Amino acid sequence: MESLRLGAFETNSSSMHAMALMSADAYEKFNAGLYYWNNNKDVIVTTQEMYDLYKKQQGETNAELIMAGHEDRVREIMSVEQFVSCLEFISENHPTSDETLLKNTSYVREFLSRNDFITVEDIERNYETDISRGYFGGEEVVAFAYYGYNG
């Protein structure tokens, strides 16, 4: 990546897929797993925003199942604490004997993959990543790009 003039980034690579600019504070939270990237909407979201979307979508799914006469497939909507536990379980990937957590984790995995929420670890695992730090308007910003699927 080349910086040809102040505030403008240009690349000589045709394989660049995306570049994100965010405040250093937001990037640290993203890197710590507190924020997620919603690839469908190109926005950073908090765990609470993810949970609210999960709850809304699960409620709509349950309503559709009931209307179609499939009450046996209706899922209980997890609490935010259960949802966060599942996110932690997925990120730590430790085995557990808790059947409820395992069952809920599969629901959360399905939700995450369906909505294409990704973390910094996903980017680093699946792509070559270029991360740069600089200042824009007096605020420290982080620019990162991902390209070239490795996985």
Image (tube, rainbow, N blue to C red):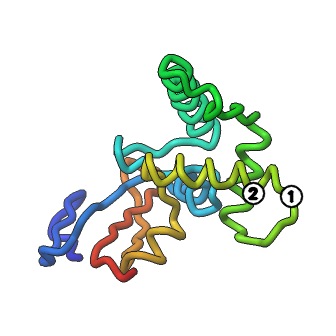
Q: Residue at x 20, y 60 (%)?
A: 8
Residue in the foreground of this view, choosing between 79 and 9:
79
Give residue 150's position: percent from left, percent from top. 36, 82
The numbered disc on residue 150 is none
Kind of residue sitting beneath label 1 = Asp
Q: Badges 1 and 2: C-beta atoms under 8 Å apart?
A: yes
Please, which residue is most extreme toward the right here?
A: 97
Closest to the observer, 76 or 91: 76
Disc 1 crowd, CA 10 A, few/some/many (<14, 14-19, 20+): few
Left or right of residue 38, residue 97 in this image: right
- In this view, the residue in front, 43 or 39, is 39
Tell me: residue 151, above or below residue 102.
Answer: below
Measuring from the top left, give residue 142's x and y in whole percent.
Answer: 43, 61
Please identify the quadrant where the N terminus is shown: bottom left
Question: On screen, 75 above or below 6?
Answer: above
Q: Quadrant of residue 32?
A: bottom right
Q: Measured from the top left, where is residue 124 in percent x and y?
A: 47, 75
The kind of residue tagged 2 is: Leu
Whole-angstrom CA distance, mark 1 to mark 2, is 6 Å
134 lies left or right of 75? left
The residue at which mark 1 appears reads as 98
Residue 38 falls left or right of residue 91? left
Q: Left or right? Give the position of 142 relative to 101.
A: left
Which residue is labeled 2 in the image?
102
Q: In terms of secondary structure, where does tag 2 sit? A: helix
Labels in figure, total: 2
